[in-house]
Image: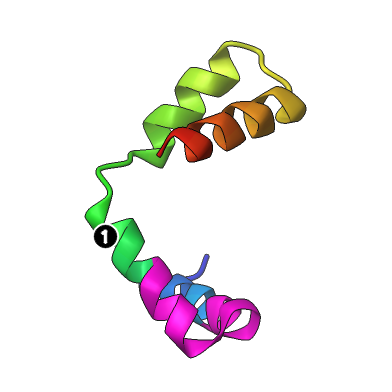
Amino acid sequence: MPSDTEIKIKGYEILLKYLGELETERFIALIQREPFDYTKWREKNLSEGKSIKDLSKKAMEFRRKA
């Protein structure tokens, strides 16, 4: 099992590959500012038996309101 440091490095490398340096830094800053608990969100939404399509639609609606 990879260590926390290895996971962070791998994640950063993936972000850099697909977003570039500036957008990666913006992404990290955005994540640090938002009080969002992905684990709680996932448990709530997956326990309701929603499909991936439903979750995507809900996420897009949420994004439009933000």
Point 70% across, 23% down: residue: 54
Q: Position of residue 26 (x, y in %)?
A: 38, 73
The residue under label 1 is: 32
Q: Is residue 64 magenta?
A: no
Q: Position of residue 6 (x, y in %)?
A: 45, 78
Point 55% across, 84% down: residue: 16
Point 56% across, 34% down: residue: 59
Q: Secondary structure at mark 1?
A: helix
Q: Position of residue 52 (x, y in %)?
A: 73, 30
Residue 4 in which image quadrant = bottom left
Which region is colored magenta? 13-27
| Left or right: where 13 falls relative to 28 | right
Given the current orientation, which residue lies at the most extreme front position?
65
The quarter of the image holding the C terminus is top left
> Can residue 12 be seen?
yes
Badge 1: how crowded within 10 Å, few (<14), some, or many (20+)? few
Residue 9 in which image quadrant = bottom left
Q: Is residue 35 above or below residue 51?
A: below
Given the current orientation, which residue lies at the most extreme bottom position?
21
Q: Position of residue 51 (x, y in %)?
A: 73, 22
Q: Is residue 33 above or below residue 35?
A: below
Q: Nearer the viewer, residue 26 or 41?
A: 26
Prevailing secondary structure of the magenta residues: helix
Q: Is residue 15 magenta?
A: yes
> Can residue 9 be seen?
no
Kind of residue sitting beneath label 1: Gln
